[in-house]
Each structure stands twice: as C-alpha cells, then as structure tokens.
Amino acid sequence: MALAVCNGAMCMCSFGTAPSPLMVLPKNKVTTSMPLANIMDNKPMTNILPFLMCTSLANPTVQAATTAALGVLTPMPCIPNITAPWMPGSPTVLIGGQPALNANSKLMCNFGGMIQITSPGQFTINIP
C-alpha cells in the first residue's frame, strides 16, 4: 500500500537544489480536501515546478555555464523537461480516468534527474 498524492505534495529532483510542490489541477479529479493526482500530472511549469537550480550536465544551460567557468560545475535555474508520465501509478485506482499517483511513483526529467515524492501531501488515504 502506498499513500495517495494530492495537490501540494512535495517533490525533489536528484539534480535539483530545493524541493518543489506538486500542483494538481482539480479538473476531472476526485477531491478530498485537496485534488488527488494521477500519472498524467506531469506537465512542466503547470504540475511540476522548478527545483530552484539544476546541476545536471545534460542540461544545456548548465553545460554551457560549466564550460564558461572552465569546468567548475555551475548550477543554472531549473526548468523541468518532462515528456513521460509518472511511473508506476496505482494498478487498481483511477483518478480522472488515469492510474492514481502514489507516493512510490517516480518521474524522469529529460536532463537525467529522477523526481520523487518526498511528502504526499496527505496521510489518510491508502491506495494499492
């Protein structure tokens, strides 16, 4: 069993320098006190906000800044680059017609970062 994830859940990217809240839009969603998330709540700058600074050399801005600093890693502002949904979602619970997002789900940034839920935003609903 994993905890359901809702609006305001805290996320962290392995290449980010600070956590960021997950923003879940309430359209077509089950709502408790907060809208519950599904695996398609993966849109950069809508659902996934910046993690302050990015430290991934796969990020072209970080690579350019690091090159300009003669090889000294130079973090640059994070702009999430995501094209795939969260995985895995709940195999048995649907939210808005898609598998529910649970606290064990992960999301990959195209710059190599792994985004994970650090706090699901609620502690009362268990989903498989």
Image (tube, rainbow, N blue to C red):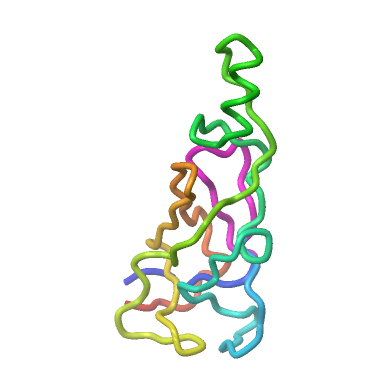
- Total marks placed: 0
Residue 14 lies in the magenta-colored region = yes
Residue 53 to residue 85: above or below: above
* Residue at 65%, 23% in the rendered image: 65
Counting from the top left corner in percent of width and height, residue 96 is at 51, 88
Counting from the top left corner in percent of width and height, residue 99 is at 40, 80
User: Magenta segment range?
Assistant: 8-21
* Residue at 66%, 55% in the rendered image: 49
* Residue at 50%, 73% in the rendered image: 40
Q: Which of 125 and 71 lies nearest the eye of the viewer? A: 71
Counting from the top left corner in percent of width and height, residue 19 is at 61, 46
Q: Indicate the quadrant where residue 91 lies.
A: bottom left
Q: Which of 113 and 11 lies nearest the eye of the viewer? A: 113
Question: Which part of the image, by quadrant, shows the N terminus?
Answer: bottom left
Q: From the viewer's perspective, tell me whether residue 81 is left or right of residue 126.
A: right
Q: Which of 57 and 4 lies nearest the eye of the viewer? A: 57
* Residue positioned most to the top: 70
* Residue at 49%, 76% in the rendered image: 38
Residue 49 to residue 7: above or below: above
Counting from the top left corner in percent of width and height, residue 77 is at 69, 38
Question: Which part of the image, by quadrant, shows the C terminus?
Answer: bottom left
Residue 32 to residue 101: above or below: below
Residue 52 lies in the magenta-colored region = no
